[in-house]
Amino acid sequence: MILIVDDRPENLISLQKVLQANNFEVDTASSGEDALKKVLKNNYVLIILDVQMPDMDGFEVAEAISGFSKAKDTAIIFLSAVNTELRFITKGYLNGGLDYITKPVDINVLLLKIKTFYRIYEQSRKLNEVQEKLLEEIEFRKLAENKKDEFISIASHELKTPLTSVKGYIQLLQRSLSRDDKTMAENHLAKASTQLEKLNDLIVDLLDISKIESGKLKFNMQSFCADNMVNNAIEMLQQANPDFKINKLGKTNEMVFGDEIRLEQVVINFITNAIKYAPGTNQVNVTINIKDGQLYLSVKDFGIGIPKEQQQKIFDKFYRVEENSNRFNGLGIGLYICAEIIARHGGKIGVNSVIDEGSEFYFIIPTDEQTISEQEEASKTI
Protein backbone atom coordinates (compact mmCIF):
# COMPACT_ATOMS: atom_id res chain seq x y z
CA MET A 1 0.00 0.00 0.00
CA ILE A 2 1.16 3.55 -0.83
CA LEU A 3 0.80 6.46 1.59
CA ILE A 4 0.49 9.95 0.06
CA VAL A 5 1.31 12.80 2.46
CA ASP A 6 0.38 16.35 1.43
CA ASP A 7 -1.27 19.28 3.26
CA ARG A 8 -3.17 20.36 0.13
CA PRO A 9 -6.39 18.33 -0.43
CA GLU A 10 -6.41 18.94 -4.19
CA ASN A 11 -2.95 17.36 -4.50
CA LEU A 12 -3.96 14.36 -2.40
CA ILE A 13 -7.16 13.71 -4.34
CA SER A 14 -5.64 14.07 -7.83
CA LEU A 15 -2.65 11.82 -7.10
CA GLN A 16 -4.81 9.30 -5.26
CA LYS A 17 -7.18 8.96 -8.26
CA VAL A 18 -4.31 8.46 -10.70
CA LEU A 19 -2.66 5.75 -8.57
CA GLN A 20 -5.95 3.96 -7.90
CA ALA A 21 -6.72 4.03 -11.63
CA ASN A 22 -3.45 2.13 -12.08
CA ASN A 23 -4.49 -0.52 -9.53
CA PHE A 24 -2.41 0.71 -6.61
CA GLU A 25 -3.83 0.54 -3.09
CA VAL A 26 -3.61 4.05 -1.64
CA ASP A 27 -3.91 5.73 1.75
CA THR A 28 -3.61 9.47 2.46
CA ALA A 29 -2.46 11.81 5.25
CA SER A 30 -2.95 15.60 5.32
CA SER A 31 -0.12 16.40 7.74
CA GLY A 32 3.17 15.09 9.05
CA GLU A 33 1.61 14.21 12.40
CA ASP A 34 -1.23 12.34 10.69
CA ALA A 35 1.32 10.47 8.57
CA LEU A 36 3.32 9.33 11.61
CA LYS A 37 0.17 8.01 13.31
CA LYS A 38 -0.72 6.00 10.20
CA VAL A 39 2.81 4.65 9.78
CA LEU A 40 2.70 3.33 13.34
CA LYS A 41 -0.60 1.52 12.69
CA ASN A 42 -0.17 0.30 9.07
CA ASN A 43 2.46 -1.22 6.81
CA TYR A 44 3.34 0.76 3.67
CA VAL A 45 5.48 -0.29 0.73
CA LEU A 46 6.05 3.31 -0.37
CA ILE A 47 5.47 6.84 1.03
CA ILE A 48 5.08 9.79 -1.36
CA LEU A 49 5.94 12.72 0.86
CA ASP A 50 5.49 16.45 0.19
CA VAL A 51 8.39 18.51 1.49
CA GLN A 52 6.59 21.84 2.19
CA MET A 53 4.09 21.28 5.00
CA PRO A 54 3.28 23.46 8.05
CA ASP A 55 4.25 22.37 11.58
CA MET A 56 6.32 19.40 10.35
CA ASP A 57 7.95 19.36 6.94
CA GLY A 58 8.70 16.28 4.85
CA PHE A 59 12.31 16.01 6.00
CA GLU A 60 11.25 15.96 9.65
CA VAL A 61 8.60 13.33 8.90
CA ALA A 62 11.17 11.13 7.13
CA GLU A 63 13.62 11.49 10.00
CA ALA A 64 10.92 10.48 12.50
CA ILE A 65 9.91 7.48 10.36
CA SER A 66 13.53 6.29 10.26
CA GLY A 67 13.34 5.95 14.04
CA PHE A 68 10.40 3.52 13.88
CA SER A 69 11.67 -0.06 13.86
CA LYS A 70 8.73 -1.34 11.79
CA ALA A 71 9.00 1.43 9.15
CA LYS A 72 12.68 2.40 9.06
CA ASP A 73 13.20 0.60 5.73
CA THR A 74 10.05 1.96 4.06
CA ALA A 75 10.87 3.66 0.74
CA ILE A 76 10.15 7.40 0.43
CA ILE A 77 9.72 9.60 -2.67
CA PHE A 78 9.94 13.33 -1.89
CA LEU A 79 7.83 15.85 -3.86
CA SER A 80 8.71 19.57 -3.80
CA ALA A 81 7.59 22.69 -5.70
CA VAL A 82 9.85 25.18 -3.88
CA ASN A 83 12.90 23.40 -2.50
CA THR A 84 14.40 22.44 -5.85
CA GLU A 85 18.00 23.41 -5.14
CA LEU A 86 20.71 20.74 -5.02
CA ARG A 87 21.17 21.13 -1.26
CA PHE A 88 17.49 20.23 -0.66
CA ILE A 89 17.65 17.30 -3.08
CA THR A 90 20.77 16.07 -1.26
CA LYS A 91 19.03 16.47 2.08
CA GLY A 92 16.13 14.39 0.78
CA TYR A 93 18.41 11.51 -0.11
CA LEU A 94 20.27 11.82 3.20
CA ASN A 95 16.91 11.51 5.01
CA GLY A 96 16.23 8.16 3.40
CA GLY A 97 14.57 9.25 0.16
CA LEU A 98 14.41 6.78 -2.72
CA ASP A 99 13.88 9.69 -5.12
CA TYR A 100 13.35 13.47 -5.12
CA ILE A 101 10.87 14.82 -7.69
CA THR A 102 10.19 18.49 -8.29
CA LYS A 103 6.77 19.93 -9.07
CA PRO A 104 4.95 20.29 -11.34
CA VAL A 105 5.02 16.50 -11.45
CA ASP A 106 5.02 14.66 -14.76
CA ILE A 107 2.49 12.01 -13.73
CA ASN A 108 3.70 9.52 -16.37
CA VAL A 109 7.26 9.78 -15.08
CA LEU A 110 6.03 9.36 -11.50
CA LEU A 111 4.00 6.27 -12.48
CA LEU A 112 7.00 4.75 -14.22
CA LYS A 113 9.15 5.34 -11.13
CA ILE A 114 6.49 3.81 -8.85
CA LYS A 115 6.00 0.77 -11.13
CA THR A 116 9.76 0.27 -11.36
CA PHE A 117 10.04 0.49 -7.59
CA TYR A 118 7.22 -2.02 -7.11
CA ARG A 119 8.89 -4.42 -9.54
CA ILE A 120 12.17 -4.12 -7.64
CA TYR A 121 10.31 -4.46 -4.34
CA GLU A 122 8.56 -7.65 -5.48
CA GLN A 123 11.81 -9.14 -6.75
CA SER A 124 13.54 -8.26 -3.49
CA ARG A 125 10.68 -9.73 -1.46
CA LYS A 126 10.79 -12.97 -3.44
CA LEU A 127 14.56 -13.16 -3.08
CA ASN A 128 14.20 -12.70 0.67
CA GLU A 129 11.59 -15.46 0.80
CA VAL A 130 13.86 -17.79 -1.17
CA GLN A 131 16.76 -16.90 1.12
CA GLU A 132 14.67 -17.59 4.22
CA LYS A 133 13.52 -20.93 2.82
CA LEU A 134 17.09 -21.86 1.95
CA LEU A 135 18.24 -20.96 5.46
CA GLU A 136 15.37 -23.00 6.93
CA GLU A 137 16.27 -25.93 4.66
CA ILE A 138 19.94 -25.70 5.65
CA GLU A 139 18.99 -25.55 9.32
CA PHE A 140 16.56 -28.45 8.90
CA ARG A 141 19.18 -30.56 7.16
CA LYS A 142 21.67 -29.79 10.00
CA LEU A 143 18.97 -30.95 12.59
CA ALA A 144 18.22 -34.01 10.37
CA GLU A 145 21.95 -34.77 10.01
CA ASN A 146 22.47 -34.49 13.75
CA LYS A 147 19.41 -36.70 14.37
CA LYS A 148 20.71 -39.25 11.87
CA ASP A 149 24.17 -39.32 13.45
CA GLU A 150 22.64 -39.61 16.92
CA PHE A 151 20.32 -42.40 15.74
CA ILE A 152 23.15 -44.33 14.08
CA SER A 153 25.17 -44.06 17.30
CA ILE A 154 22.23 -45.22 19.43
CA ALA A 155 21.25 -47.99 16.99
CA SER A 156 24.82 -49.24 16.85
CA HIS A 157 24.97 -49.38 20.64
CA GLU A 158 21.54 -50.99 20.99
CA LEU A 159 22.32 -53.67 18.38
CA LYS A 160 25.77 -54.43 19.76
CA THR A 161 24.53 -54.89 23.34
CA PRO A 162 22.38 -58.03 22.80
CA LEU A 163 24.83 -59.32 20.18
CA THR A 164 27.72 -59.08 22.63
CA SER A 165 25.58 -60.80 25.29
CA VAL A 166 24.71 -63.64 22.91
CA LYS A 167 28.38 -64.19 22.13
CA GLY A 168 29.17 -64.26 25.84
CA TYR A 169 26.39 -66.76 26.66
CA ILE A 170 27.45 -69.02 23.77
CA GLN A 171 30.99 -69.12 25.15
CA LEU A 172 29.62 -69.96 28.61
CA LEU A 173 27.34 -72.55 27.01
CA GLN A 174 30.33 -74.21 25.31
CA ARG A 175 32.19 -74.39 28.62
CA SER A 176 29.14 -75.85 30.37
CA LEU A 177 28.79 -78.51 27.67
CA SER A 178 32.46 -79.38 27.93
CA ARG A 179 31.93 -79.89 31.68
CA ASP A 180 28.71 -81.80 30.97
CA ASP A 181 26.79 -79.30 33.16
CA LYS A 182 23.34 -79.59 31.54
CA THR A 183 21.52 -77.29 34.02
CA MET A 184 23.98 -74.45 33.54
CA ALA A 185 23.98 -75.01 29.77
CA GLU A 186 20.19 -74.71 29.65
CA ASN A 187 20.38 -71.51 31.73
CA HIS A 188 22.93 -69.94 29.38
CA LEU A 189 20.91 -71.04 26.36
CA ALA A 190 17.74 -69.42 27.74
CA LYS A 191 19.57 -66.14 28.39
CA ALA A 192 21.09 -66.19 24.90
CA SER A 193 17.62 -66.78 23.47
CA THR A 194 16.26 -63.76 25.37
CA GLN A 195 19.01 -61.55 23.97
CA LEU A 196 18.32 -62.84 20.45
CA GLU A 197 14.67 -61.87 20.90
CA LYS A 198 15.74 -58.34 21.84
CA LEU A 199 17.97 -58.23 18.77
CA ASN A 200 15.12 -59.47 16.60
CA ASP A 201 12.75 -56.82 18.00
CA LEU A 202 15.27 -54.08 17.19
CA ILE A 203 15.71 -55.32 13.64
CA VAL A 204 11.93 -55.57 13.15
CA ASP A 205 11.53 -51.96 14.31
CA LEU A 206 14.27 -50.79 11.93
CA LEU A 207 12.61 -52.64 9.05
CA ASP A 208 9.24 -51.10 9.95
CA ILE A 209 10.81 -47.62 9.91
CA SER A 210 12.22 -48.33 6.45
CA LYS A 211 8.82 -49.53 5.21
CA ILE A 212 7.04 -46.49 6.65
CA GLU A 213 9.52 -44.15 4.93
CA SER A 214 9.02 -45.90 1.59
CA GLY A 215 5.24 -46.24 2.00
CA LYS A 216 5.46 -50.04 1.95
CA LEU A 217 4.29 -50.88 5.47
CA LYS A 218 1.63 -53.50 4.73
CA PHE A 219 -1.63 -53.99 6.62
CA ASN A 220 -3.87 -57.05 6.60
CA MET A 221 -7.25 -55.54 7.45
CA GLN A 222 -10.02 -57.91 8.55
CA SER A 223 -12.54 -58.43 11.36
CA PHE A 224 -11.22 -59.86 14.63
CA CYS A 225 -12.02 -59.99 18.33
CA ALA A 226 -10.21 -57.13 20.06
CA ASP A 227 -10.60 -58.75 23.47
CA ASN A 228 -8.78 -61.88 22.35
CA MET A 229 -6.00 -59.77 20.83
CA VAL A 230 -5.44 -57.94 24.13
CA ASN A 231 -5.62 -61.19 26.13
CA ASN A 232 -2.92 -62.75 23.92
CA ALA A 233 -0.61 -59.75 24.37
CA ILE A 234 -1.10 -59.73 28.15
CA GLU A 235 -0.53 -63.49 28.44
CA MET A 236 2.71 -63.35 26.48
CA LEU A 237 4.11 -60.41 28.47
CA GLN A 238 2.91 -61.81 31.79
CA GLN A 239 4.93 -64.98 31.18
CA ALA A 240 8.00 -62.91 30.29
CA ASN A 241 7.53 -60.68 33.37
CA PRO A 242 6.22 -62.95 36.17
CA ASP A 243 7.03 -60.40 38.89
CA PHE A 244 4.77 -57.79 37.27
CA LYS A 245 0.99 -57.92 37.61
CA ILE A 246 -0.75 -56.92 34.38
CA ASN A 247 -4.37 -56.11 35.27
CA LYS A 248 -7.00 -56.15 32.54
CA LEU A 249 -9.89 -53.75 33.12
CA GLY A 250 -12.94 -54.03 30.91
CA LYS A 251 -14.05 -56.56 28.33
CA THR A 252 -15.78 -56.63 24.97
CA ASN A 253 -17.08 -59.35 22.68
CA GLU A 254 -17.55 -57.04 19.70
CA MET A 255 -15.60 -57.47 16.49
CA VAL A 256 -13.19 -54.83 15.22
CA PHE A 257 -12.03 -54.21 11.65
CA GLY A 258 -8.28 -53.73 11.40
CA ASP A 259 -4.89 -55.41 11.32
CA GLU A 260 -4.87 -57.61 14.41
CA ILE A 261 -1.12 -58.24 14.36
CA ARG A 262 -0.24 -54.55 13.98
CA LEU A 263 -2.65 -53.47 16.73
CA GLU A 264 -1.27 -56.20 18.99
CA GLN A 265 2.17 -54.72 18.24
CA VAL A 266 0.93 -51.40 19.65
CA VAL A 267 -0.48 -53.04 22.79
CA ILE A 268 2.76 -54.95 23.35
CA ASN A 269 4.77 -51.76 22.92
CA PHE A 270 2.57 -49.91 25.41
CA ILE A 271 2.81 -52.67 28.04
CA THR A 272 6.55 -53.23 27.50
CA ASN A 273 7.22 -49.51 27.96
CA ALA A 274 4.97 -49.43 31.03
CA ILE A 275 7.05 -52.15 32.66
CA LYS A 276 10.36 -50.69 31.47
CA TYR A 277 9.72 -47.14 32.64
CA ALA A 278 8.22 -48.03 35.99
CA PRO A 279 11.14 -49.37 38.05
CA GLY A 280 10.24 -50.13 41.64
CA THR A 281 6.55 -50.80 40.82
CA ASN A 282 4.84 -54.12 40.21
CA GLN A 283 1.62 -53.54 38.29
CA VAL A 284 0.20 -52.18 35.04
CA ASN A 285 -3.46 -51.57 34.17
CA VAL A 286 -4.75 -52.35 30.68
CA THR A 287 -8.20 -50.92 29.92
CA ILE A 288 -10.34 -51.91 26.93
CA ASN A 289 -13.87 -50.97 25.89
CA ILE A 290 -15.93 -50.27 22.81
CA LYS A 291 -18.39 -47.37 22.82
CA ASP A 292 -20.18 -45.50 20.04
CA GLY A 293 -18.40 -47.50 17.35
CA GLN A 294 -14.90 -46.85 18.71
CA LEU A 295 -12.37 -49.11 20.38
CA TYR A 296 -10.58 -47.51 23.33
CA LEU A 297 -7.45 -49.11 24.77
CA SER A 298 -5.07 -47.70 27.36
CA VAL A 299 -2.09 -48.92 29.35
CA LYS A 300 -1.35 -47.16 32.63
CA ASP A 301 1.79 -47.50 34.69
CA PHE A 302 2.76 -45.97 38.03
CA GLY A 303 6.32 -45.06 37.18
CA ILE A 304 8.49 -42.03 36.52
CA GLY A 305 6.13 -40.11 34.22
CA ILE A 306 6.93 -37.75 31.33
CA PRO A 307 7.40 -33.95 31.57
CA LYS A 308 4.41 -32.10 30.10
CA GLU A 309 6.48 -30.16 27.57
CA GLN A 310 7.81 -33.43 26.11
CA GLN A 311 4.53 -35.32 25.89
CA GLN A 312 3.66 -33.93 22.43
CA LYS A 313 7.06 -35.04 21.07
CA ILE A 314 6.97 -38.56 22.44
CA PHE A 315 5.54 -39.99 19.18
CA ASP A 316 8.11 -38.24 16.96
CA LYS A 317 10.63 -40.37 15.11
CA PHE A 318 13.86 -41.00 17.06
CA TYR A 319 12.61 -38.93 20.03
CA ARG A 320 13.77 -40.02 23.47
CA VAL A 321 12.80 -38.28 26.70
CA GLU A 322 15.94 -36.41 27.73
CA GLU A 323 15.72 -37.27 31.41
CA ASN A 324 15.52 -40.99 30.60
CA SER A 325 17.85 -41.33 27.60
CA ASN A 326 20.82 -42.33 29.74
CA ARG A 327 18.85 -44.54 32.13
CA PHE A 328 16.91 -46.68 29.66
CA ASN A 329 17.86 -48.34 26.39
CA GLY A 330 15.86 -47.77 23.22
CA LEU A 331 15.98 -46.40 19.68
CA GLY A 332 13.15 -43.91 20.06
CA ILE A 333 11.15 -45.42 17.20
CA GLY A 334 8.67 -47.77 18.89
CA LEU A 335 6.04 -45.13 19.64
CA TYR A 336 6.58 -43.52 16.23
CA ILE A 337 5.69 -46.85 14.61
CA CYS A 338 2.67 -47.18 16.93
CA ALA A 339 1.48 -43.72 15.88
CA GLU A 340 1.76 -44.70 12.22
CA ILE A 341 -0.21 -47.91 12.81
CA ILE A 342 -3.02 -46.04 14.59
CA ALA A 343 -3.06 -43.34 11.89
CA ARG A 344 -3.51 -46.06 9.25
CA HIS A 345 -6.53 -47.21 11.23
CA GLY A 346 -8.02 -43.71 11.13
CA GLY A 347 -7.53 -43.34 14.87
CA LYS A 348 -5.95 -41.19 17.56
CA ILE A 349 -3.01 -41.93 19.83
CA GLY A 350 -1.97 -40.01 22.93
CA VAL A 351 -0.56 -39.94 26.44
CA ASN A 352 -1.53 -38.53 29.82
CA SER A 353 1.27 -38.33 32.34
CA VAL A 354 2.25 -36.82 35.67
CA ILE A 355 5.85 -36.79 36.90
CA ASP A 356 6.50 -39.46 39.58
CA GLU A 357 2.88 -40.66 39.32
CA GLY A 358 2.99 -42.55 36.04
CA SER A 359 1.84 -42.45 32.43
CA GLU A 360 -1.21 -43.66 30.54
CA PHE A 361 -0.78 -44.33 26.82
CA TYR A 362 -3.95 -44.83 24.81
CA PHE A 363 -5.39 -45.16 21.34
CA ILE A 364 -8.89 -44.83 19.93
CA ILE A 365 -9.85 -46.32 16.56
CA PRO A 366 -13.17 -46.77 14.72
CA THR A 367 -14.37 -50.36 14.68
CA ASP A 368 -15.95 -50.49 11.20
CA GLU A 369 -14.28 -50.57 7.77
CA GLN A 370 -16.09 -47.58 6.25
CA THR A 371 -15.20 -45.15 9.05
CA ILE A 372 -11.55 -46.26 9.00
CA SER A 373 -11.33 -45.63 5.24
CA GLU A 374 -13.03 -42.23 5.52
CA GLN A 375 -10.85 -41.02 8.40
CA GLU A 376 -7.64 -42.30 6.80
CA GLU A 377 -8.46 -40.41 3.60
CA ALA A 378 -9.29 -37.28 5.60
CA SER A 379 -5.93 -37.45 7.40
CA LYS A 380 -4.10 -37.56 4.05
CA THR A 381 -5.65 -34.28 2.96
CA ILE A 382 -4.74 -32.36 6.16
Image: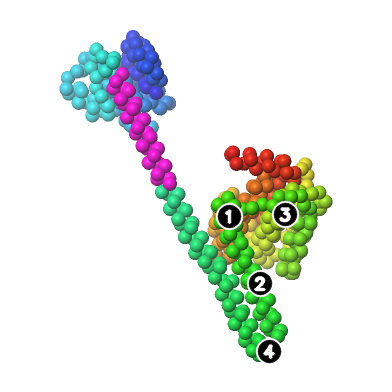
Which quarter shows the N terminus? top left
Residue at 31%, 22% in the rendered image: 114
Q: Secondary structure at mark 1?
A: helix
Which sits in the foreground, 135 or 163? 163
Q: Earlier in the sequence, mark 2 or mark 3?
A: 2
**Badge 3 local density, few (<14 within 10 Å), some, or many (20+)?**
many
> At label 4, which amino acid type do we have?
Asp
Viewer-nearest of labels 2 and 1?
1
Residue 302, numbered label: none
Q: Measured along the vertical axis of the image, is residue 119 above or below residue 177?
A: above
Say if mark 2 contacts mark 3, CB within 8 Å: no
**Badge 2 local density, few (<14 within 10 Å), some, or many (20+)?**
some
Quarter location, residue 76: top left
Which sits in the foreground, 117 or 274? 117
Q: CA distance from mark 2 to mark 3?
A: 25 Å
Question: Which x, y percent locates residue 321?
Answer: 57, 57
Viewer-nearest of labels 2 and 4?
4
> At label 3, which amino acid type do we have?
Glu
Residue at 52%, 66% in the rendered image: 156
Q: Which residue is mark 1?
A: 211
Say if mark 3 contacts mark 1, CB within 8 Å: no
Q: Secondary structure at mark 3?
A: helix
Q: Which residue is mark 2?
A: 194
| Residue extent of the magenta highlight | 111-137
Residue 260, numbered label: 3
Q: Earlier in the sequence, mark 3 or mark 1?
A: 1
Q: Measured along the vertical axis of the image, is residue 152 above or below residue 44?
A: below
Q: CA distance from mark 4 to mark 3?
A: 45 Å
